[in-house]
Image (tube, helix red, strand yellow):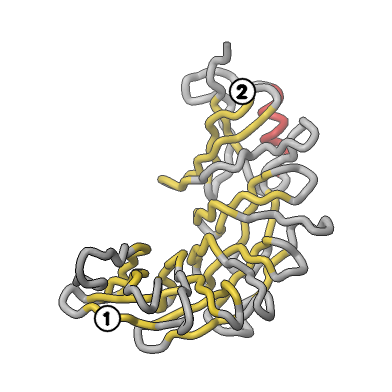
Amino acid sequence: SDITPGINSSSPQQLTAIGDWLYFTANAGAVGYELWRTNGTVTIQAADIYNDGYSNPAEFTEFNGYLYFQAYDATNGVELWRTNGTTTELVQDIRTGTDSSNPSRFTAFNSYLYFQANDGTNGYELWRTDGTTLGTTLVEDINTNVGGSSYPNYFTALGDFLYFNANDGTHGYELWRINDEGTTQSVAVPGTSAGVGCMCARPLSAMDGRLFIAMYSDETGSEFAYLDEPTFGLPPTNRDGSVWSTALVLLAAVTAVAGVGLRMRGAPRS
């Protein structure tokens, strides 16, 4: 479809498939960037959220048959929306009034959609929604410092937990996890350097029952590590037969208290 006829561009973005439809944002000229969808034959505007300007829908994520996203209108600012293609609705005005909560990093896990948002009181913290207004809640204010934000990010599911990075304002970015009951837990041990966490703010990746991460320690710097789910065992030697260092064995012992074992393979350092 030539959504904006002629040489002007609609610049479709955020392409996300749900059922038989592909949703995206596009600029049709007069209405600006709004929500569209296509089944490959029919291409239509799904909603005009901000009638007098651009709603700029973004962060498209499928959850329970709905497309969830952030979008702007003059009444609520940038807030949490959803659509099933027929009905497009504001889920909750998390930061009431025209100020924006800027919900982002949407990740579906079991019964909830998790994300970060700023309610104007707690900073950017961990939220989740079941799709209802009452079911859209702050999970935990991880960084309780005045004006502080934990910026939860890199949500990655493994086993019964959703893992993510967050900064509690004291230990830097660490590895956290949450289960479907809403119980959060710090997994990694705080770094031994002032203001430096064990976890760098880098993506997590799950594969074959392991969570792969980049982990910081004073001994090795930032190196490659992995966490086993759900056995959390620590072998006496590394895969190449080398013995674990004392510092990392202590690290494993402390994390074992939380039911978690971290393993690290340190690269030779010059």
State which mark lies toward you, 1 or 2.
1
SS for dot 1: strand
Q: Amino acid at mark 2?
A: Trp
Q: Is residue 142 left or right of residue 264?
A: right
Residue 48 sits in quarter: bottom left
The residue identified by callout 2 is 244
**Which residue is at a point 25% across and 75% down the rendered structure image?**
38
User: Considering the image in quadrants, where does the C terminus appear?
Assistant: top right
The residue sitting at 65% across, 63% down in the picture is 126
Image coords of residue 92 (percent x, y): 60, 81
220 or 106: nearer the viewer: 106
Classify the position of the N terminus by image quarter: bottom left
Q: Nearer the viewer, residue 41 or 261?
A: 41
Find numbered disc 2 in the image and state the secondary structure of the residue it sits on: loop
Q: Is residue 219 left or right of residue 155?
A: right
Q: Residue furthest right?
A: 146
- The residue that disc 1 covers is 44
Residue 64 placement (x, y as % from top left)? 42, 77
Instruction: Say which residue appears at 67% left-offset and 37% top-offset.
Output: 198
Answer with left or right where residue 175 lies relative to residue 72.
Answer: right
In the image, what residue type sits under mark 1? Ile
Q: Position of residue 137 (x, y in %)?
A: 66, 75
Dividing the picture into quarters, in which one does residue 103 lie? bottom right
Q: CA distance from mark 1 to mark 2?
A: 59 Å
* Depicted 28 relative to depicted 86: above or below: above
